[in-house]
Image (cartoon, rainbow, N blue to C red):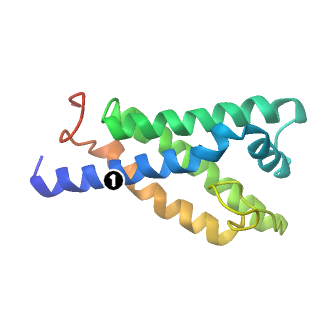
Amino acid sequence: MSTIKQLISIGCRLFLAWLFIYASYDKVWYPAGFAVSVGRYEVLPLLLVQPLSVLLAWMELLVGFLLLAGVWTRAAALCSAGLLVMFTGLMLYAWFIGAGYDCGCFPGQAGEHAAGLEAAFRDIIMLLPALWLTWLPGRWLTLKRTT
């Protein structure tokens, strides 16, 4: 793989690692608040909101650390792409129904990150590095060589 492709892969991997670790911080340490955000979408049965919100938060953290370490990079990138596609769908759904609530995506003040079309475009842009890494995960600065 050429040097420029390796550099792009490292940049994509570190960006996504930062993104998922940052996004998971409040969700992991304050799961009740994130469960409220998940419940606002009203797409899950109430019984599943808490366990799935906890699972999602820890999945984001795990994907972030796998990408940071460069372990199972292609699998972590594929998982991050799947998460971002799901988030994009939720943002489009929120826009379609005219919801004005906070997306629950990142730490910050309530209402700082509104769910909707703008958030969907943001998620699509963040999907691009994940797609790159599923294609070319790179080998530089990894704990495990990828093939």
Q: How many marks?
A: 1
The quarter of the rendered structure image containing the C terminus is top left
**Residue at the image point whose x is 66% and y is 60% from the top:** 108
Q: Is residue 81 left or right of residue 46?
A: left
Residue 133: horizontal and vertical position, in percent? 33, 46
**Residue at the image point whose x is 83% and y is 45% from the top:** 39
Residue 143: horizontal and vertical position, in percent? 24, 30
Residue 131: horizontal and vertical position, in percent? 39, 50
Can you tell which quarter of the image residue 92 is in? bottom right
User: In the figure, 77 relative to 23: above or below?
Assistant: above
**Residue at the image point whose x is 70% and y is 68% from the top:** 112
In-front residue for pair 89/38: 38
Q: Residue at the right extreme?
A: 46
**Residue at the image point whose x is 39% and y is 34% from the top:** 66
Using a 10 Å C-alpha cutoff, classify the residue at mark 1 as few (fewer than 14 neighbours), some (14 to 19) or many (20 or more).
many
Residue 141: horizontal and vertical position, in percent? 20, 40
Q: Which residue is mark 1?
A: 12
In-front residue for pair 96/126: 126
Q: Which element type, helix, strand or loop, lies under badge 1?
A: helix
Residue type at tag 1: Cys
Q: Is residue 71 left or right of residue 34?
A: left
Q: Residue at the left extreme?
A: 2
In-front residue for pair 4/70: 70
